[in-house]
Amino acid sequence: MFKKTLVAVSLAAASLASATAMAAENVDLLIKNATVLTMDEDKNVYEKGLVAVKENKIVAVTDGSDLKEFEAKKVIDADGDIVMPGLINTHTHVSMTVFRSLADDVPDRLHRYIFPLESKLVTRDMVRIGAQLGNVEMLKGGVTTYADMYYFEDEVAKTVDEIGMRAILGETVIKFPVADAANAEEGIKYAVNFIEEYKDHPRITPAFAPHAPYTNTTETLQKITELSKKYDVPVLIHLAESDREDQVIAERSGGMSPVEYMADIGALTPNLVGAHVINVSDSDIELLKKHDVGIAHNMSANIKSAKGVSPALKMFDDGLRIGLGTDGPMSGNTISTLDEFNQVAKVHKLVNKDRAAMPPMKVVEMATIGAARALHMEDTIGSLEVGKLADIIVIDTKAPNMVPVYNPYSALVYSAYAANVKHTIVDGQILMKDRTMTTVDEDKIRNEALAFADKVRKTVIESGEVVQ
């Protein structure tokens, strides 16, 4: 009798185990034992949480108590590390990595140095080489999505496709001759061709990128606005960035600010993402909110160029769509959004003379779901929620600069370096594991960039053809 009972119990246990196994959800990737910062509406944090991914989407974000309910092809044991949404860089010029550290302190550098430099050295090859290098830098710094403005953006798109990142790529339109267009009209045609080629890409959103209001005519800006509506694509632009822009637009419009002028000509739309937005009044801010414009806040580039500090905190608190950007690698020099955190928090405290201003949670929000809102992508990226795309990063909390972690938001903003990013996942694919790139050859990319730097030295520095 005892033996029969024992057999029955054993069979029942085996049957239960089998049923449990059958009930377990099969997923492609499981991240467990994590300090999960969801950045969802309630800012839920799970100290021993898990994130489950199937194909390219998140299927579970929990406190980890249901760990046994998942069977995964790949498992990352975070061992207490911070797991959070991938960072979003709302404004950069990625290909300019090959010009980094040139003429850092030249006054009026854009017009005296950068434009002349680009006229001599920007080619398809340069754009490809610079973009590859910048992609690696951003990915290693936890950036999973970025918004770019430059020339030959179809070359940038190829590099994004190869490495596996997500990007909004804006083809520059400007009124004077540049590397890929003789004038603004040619630039628009180039942009339209690019948009038609990439409009259905799963990770690349093509866009128009008129350089600025003052470097384009009213007619060009209006035409781009209409085309952006036709193709349903973003428009990336530098806006309210400089005194020169203020002066040119005031003369053109009879005294309007750049924001007022853009509204007046019908160019303020929900498709628009304005970078910098430094010189704005309260009424300008109201216009930006009314027209649902996205804003890219680039702290380090703005203070390095001495252009001022954007009222980004006011815009954030007023409910505008605002996220962090880095500007190009000739402006802020580093293009990982995480490198912006410390300065964003501290400088806003300084200018507001308030130690409590811009707390860490707001900074992290502006780098994740806030940046997604700025790009009108908050329904798909920016937070760890079921149904969203699996763009996820893991931050090492065992590094000396991160020990101890009492508050994960404070640790990220005041202690973390970009080099603390341990793993980077985009669209469900692990693109960096334990600081090693998985889809591209980092050494080859670096060596090609160094070889191009020799060309820059010979062409620019030694010849003295461009002012330093």
Image: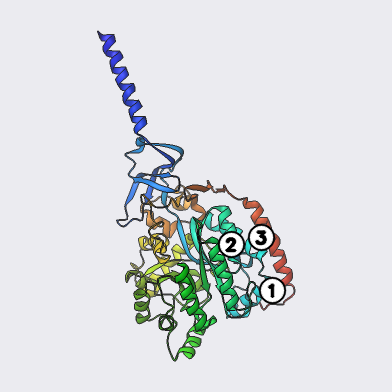
Q: Is residue 188 left or right of residue 383?
A: right
Question: Looking at the image, do the residues carrying marks 3 and 2 touch, with CB atoms under 8 Å apart?
Answer: no
* Callouts 1 and 2 close, C-beta under 8 Å: no
Which residue is tagged 1? 120
Please say if 40 is above or below 73.
below
- The residue type indicated by label 2 comes to Val
Nearer to the camera, 131 or 395: 131
Q: Give the label, 1 or 2, closer to the camera.
A: 2
**Amino acid of disc 3:** Ala
Q: Quick check: marks 3 and 1 in contact, CB under 8 Å?
A: no
- Asked if 60 appears above or below 407 in the picture, the reply is above
Residue type of the residue flagged with mark 1 = Lys
Residue labelled with disc 2 = 156
* Mark 3 secondary-structure assignment: helix
Residue 326 visible to the viewer: no
Foreground pick, 231 / 314? 231
- Residue 192 in the image: x percent, y percent? 55, 69
- In this rendering, would 46 be left or right of 424? left
In this figure, which residue is indicated by the disc labeled 3? 449
For residue 122, above or below residue 442? below
For residue 177, say whether it is visible. Answer: yes
Relative to 299, is 191 on the left or the right?
Answer: right
Q: Secondary structure at mark 2?
A: helix
Report the residue at 43% width, 90% height from top.
255
Residue 61 % position (x, y): 35, 46
Residue depicted at 51% across the width and 87% down the height = 248
